[in-house]
Every structure is written in C-alpha cells, then in structure tokens.
Image: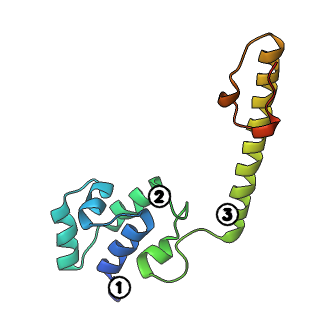
Amino acid sequence: MPEIKLDVGGILDRTKSLYGLGADADLARFLDMSPSGIATWRRRQTIDLNLLVERCMMSPSPKTGQINLHWLITGEGEPGFEPINLFIRQAIMEATVEQLEEVEKRVIAKLQAEGVKIPRDSIDHGSDATEP
C-alpha cells in the first residue's frame, strides 16, 4: 500500500485557524497535550490524527460549527458544513428565539396582571414593553 504524505504543518495551522488559536501553545492546550508535543509533530512530520479528529469532533468550531475533516486533513474544500445545514440551523435558531420571546412576553404579562411591578429597564423589547 502506498504511503500517504500528510502536510502536518498545514493540518495544525488549519486547526488553529478554525478554532481561532494563535500559537502552537494554544493548540497544545486545545488538544490537552504539551507544546513540545506539537513541536515534535512539526519536526517529525507525524501527527496523532485520532487525537486531533476526536477533539475536533467534540468541539464545534466557533467559526463554522461542524468541521469538514477532508478540508482539515487535505486543505481541499471548505472548512465548514454544507450551506443547507447552515440554513436549517439558522432557521431553528430564529424560530427558537421567536418562541422564547413570545413566552417571555406572556410571563411578563401574567406577572403584571398579578400586580408584580417589573422595572422597564429589565424588559428588553423597546416599544413593545408595557407597564401596569
């Protein structure tokens, strides 16, 4: 079987970029290992892919959410998930926020109907807010 040559530096740099990590020491903390371990990977051009993939799969990227492992390993494609998944996730988030705001309005109205005084500045709905 032919040996696959990995660009270890590229993999490490893409991981740092994906998670907003500046230095190799930050990456080492993210992977729960010593900075000298990262330096060894770079020097020897070897990497513990199981550790890296496991950690990345347990930690959604703040930039893209889920990660594209093909991109992480090869640099080909896009770092995040498919646009349809992003669309679905955004729709769910918007629906959830709208539902929570509606529940909050009903709770505030019920409390006000029961005579509870709620300071105007604790209600963050602008002109929608009413006082008893």
| Residues tagged 3 and 1 counted as in contact (Cβ below 8 A) | no
Disc nearer the start of the sequence (2/1): 1
Amino acid at the residue labelled 3: Leu
Per the model, the C-alpha gap separating discs 3 and 1 is: 32 Å
Q: Which residue corresponds to mark 2?
A: 57
Locate residue 36 relative to residue 125 in the image: left or right.
left
Mark seen at residue 86:
3
Sequence-earlier tag: 3 or 2? 2
Q: 48 or 131, which lies in front? A: 131
- Name the residue located 82 percent from the left edge and 22 percent from the top edge: 109
Pinpoint residue 115: horizontal percent, then vertical percent: 79, 10
Res 98 → quadrant: top right
Q: Residue 4 has which mark? A: 1
Which of discs 2 and 1 lies nearer the camera? The answer is 2
* Figure quadrant of residue 9: bottom left
Say what secondary structure mark 2 lies in: helix
Foreground tag (3 vs 1): 3
Question: Which kind of residue does numbered mark 2 sit on?
Answer: Met
Residue at left offset 42%, top offset 76%? 73
Residue in the image at 41% along x and 70% along y: 17
Q: Residues within 10 Å of mark 3 (few under 14, many from 20)?
A: some
Of the 4 image quadrants, the one containing the N terminus is: bottom left
SS assignment at label 3: helix
Residue 81, percent across and down?
60, 68
Upstream in sequence: badge 3 or badge 1:
1
Q: Position of residue 8 (x, y in %)?
A: 30, 78
Is residue 119 positioned above or below 5 on the image? above
How far apart, in angstroms, are the residues tagged by discs 3 and 2? Answer: 17 Å
Quadrant hosting residue 85: bottom right
